[in-house]
Image (cartoon, rainbow, N blue to C red):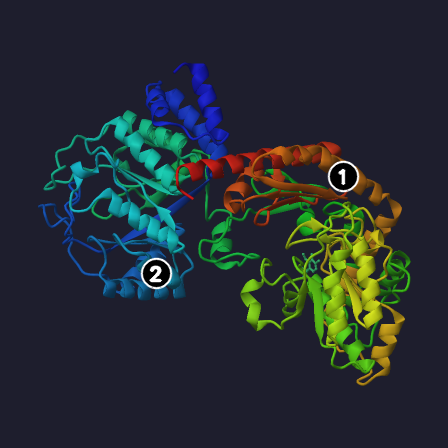
Amino acid sequence: MSCIDFEKFVTDIIDGYRCTARELESVAKLPLGQLVDGAHRVTQSCSSRTFNFCAIVNAKSGRCSENCRWCAQSSHYEGKCSVYPLLGKQAIIENALKAKASGCTRFSLVTSGRKLAAREVRECAEIVRALREVTSMEICISAGLLTKSEFELLHQAGVTRCHCNLETAPSFFSKVCDSHTIEDKIKSLKAACEAGLEICSGGIIGMGERLKERIELALTLRDLGVPSIPINVLEPIVGTPLGTQPYLSEDEIIRTIALFRFANPEAYLRFAGGRRRLSEQATRMALRAGINSAIAGDMLTTKGTGIDDDKRLVKAAGYRLENENSLDFDHEHLWHPYAATLSAPTVRKVIATEGTRITLDDGTQLIDGTSAWWCAAFGHRHPKLVDAIKRQLDTLPHVMFAGFTHDPAIELGRKLLKMVPAGLQKIFYADSGSVAVEAAMKMAIQYQCAVGQAQRTNFVTIKKGYHGDTWNAMSVCDPVAGMHSLFGSALTARYFIESPSCTFDGHFNEDDMKELQSLLQTHDDIAALILEPVFQGASAMRFYHPRFLKEAKTLCERHGVLFIADEIATGFGRTGKDFACQWANVTPDIMTLGKALTGGMMTLSCVLTTNKIADSISAAAPHAFMHGPTFMANPLACAAANAALQLYREHDWLGEAKRIEHGLKEGLFSLRAHPGIRDVRVLGAIGVVELDQPVESRWIQEKFIRQGVWVRPIGNLCYLMPPLVTTNQELKTLTMAVCRVLQKQIERQNSRQCNGND
Ligand code: PMP
């Protein structure tokens, strides 16, 4: 392979290409320096630059029934090793805490034998529970050929990863072990995946296998989708059949690591046993070639290296350490939105925001394609908003709103009333979108009670909706496809009608009204209809015909049902109107606002309603609206909102939304013809690409970051809702990144399906 070809090979791999065994055999002949440089570029572009240390404890040692020819623990040979049954909790906890103190973020319990007995699996689960009581380190298990139900038991106890090395190439395995097969191992790894565990699997090089077989191992691991690959170099142990095997040369070891990197661009390649024999110079090259994790300390039956030495070399190689920037604390203790704490998602540390940019702690700048969940509409940290909050802070950061009022609340109210549809006269401040939805629903019930319709205690909404995470808000989210389907029977059952079939600019279909019409005719227990006007956000990212709103409002009026418009996502220009209701010239009975209300600076929401509703509630017992959050009308938040609305008035934001709509159409519509893409739709400053399949969140997030953008798809929906200050050039970068990354995602999913690995 010529130099030029190698360049292309490396670039293709960075672009997601899955190389073949022949290509790897061919590049393996290149000069070592060139090979390592190529592998280094792949590591930098595709894999983690934060180095991860794990530690292992030999939790049960010796007397192994298996005949692995390298292993001192096999009872078939004379290799020397300690022999003891499963260690007690205390000993293991001590080991783990020591490892944690030295900077390890993972801890693995390794046991000898073909597999643990059922009793031992239960004991191990108990040990893991005890470990999780004192530490939040990630726990791995390496306990032989366990089954899915055994892995499930361990996963429930807190294990996040199963380790089981394939050891060597499938075609070579029987030469080094014949008491079990490599298929047994693969079966167990697949069982671990099915039980919800991550997998860690690698091998030992230098057992007499040829380069061809090392490549076969690397590609087998890739096809299994292994994210963490320990690479051991055989330490020949006296008394075992491989005890006299010559030690691999440094050149061969580094070359192998580079080939593993080409085969597994994204995986952690983990330095494991046998590396202590490498010279410092060779260790540096191995780190450059792609080692970005290590088992620290001693191995099971051989000596390891000191972690302090490791850390020095790792840092010199340009890696950051996982516990260096407190991400380990976040990983172990902070619960992120819609996230697990076992195998928690990767999060990045942000140190600053400005305008359209988010700055990470390594200096990376990302263009925000989400407006921080659609709230930083006028750009992050707008100086006028910062200034308003600072000024407010000096005089009145907070005071209760019961019995008191203050200028920021009054001024904000004045501004709001000038903007919202005429007829909305009363404003109730709340502290988040979900709480505004709760308050809006309570308002509807109290109104119905007040006007003698106490039986009207339920709500109707359209499917595919999203209204927040609190109890009543959840009850009106889509009950099947939504994020809260799990809570199903715990929530009050609401009436769900089909979401309008007619698209925003399609032909309006009268039939879309039939279900609501007949429901309202036949049911007298409905207090209100709640809707996201025109744009259904977090559950569906779809736009529907404004006429539906108009007709729905008329039907509601006819039947004494209130109409609640949840404008938390759509308010303040996002869809190209100040409020999405205005697409239909509809004044809702109750309207909720949030998100962009403070320009994304503070948490604040509000519920607006008519005098008729407010008066009715007030005239009836208990002569009060029964809601009052501690932080309602927080002056700092109101000051931010005042400045945000001032900004909103001073600039043509609807013009900006139009401009962004144009840019989104221009940048995203080309995807429409692409296989794997179901739909591309744009309205105002919202662009949505719907895929046939859900995306792989971790993978795609990393890819977007490498393109310099912040985009967070939900399931099979990839959306852009950039700040309205996003320039045309930035918009281009965003849409190009979306096109590029989604195409790669689809190719990747297709190639996995071809390999039968989905
Ligand atoms: N309603 C709608 C339409 C929303 O989009 C959201 C948030 N995505 C909420 C309510 C809930 O708002 P919050 O997350 O501030 O509670």
Q: Position of residue 331 (x, y in %)?
A: 49, 54
- Asked if residue 92 is positioned above or below residue 371 in the image, the reply reads below
Residue tagged 2: 154
What amino acid type should be assigned to the residue bearing mark 1?
Ile
Frontmost residue, 390 versus 39: 39
**Residue drawn at (16%, 52%), measured in percent from left and top?**
64
The image quadrant that residue 579 belongs to is bottom right
Q: Is residue 222 left or right of residue 300?
A: right
Q: For the image shown, how many numbered marks are present on the structure? A: 2
Q: Position of residue 134 (x, y in %)?
A: 39, 64
The N terminus appears in which quarter of the rendering?
A: top left
Q: Is residue 87 left or right of residue 292?
A: left
- Asked if residue 404 is positioned above or below residue 95 in the image, the reply reads below
What amino acid type should be assigned to the residue bearing mark 2?
Leu
Q: Position of residue 546 (x, y in %)?
A: 80, 53
Q: Position of residue 713 (x, y in %)?
A: 60, 46
Q: Residues within 10 Å of mark 2 (few under 14, many from 20)?
A: many
**Residue drawn at (8%, 46%), measured in percent from left and top?**
78
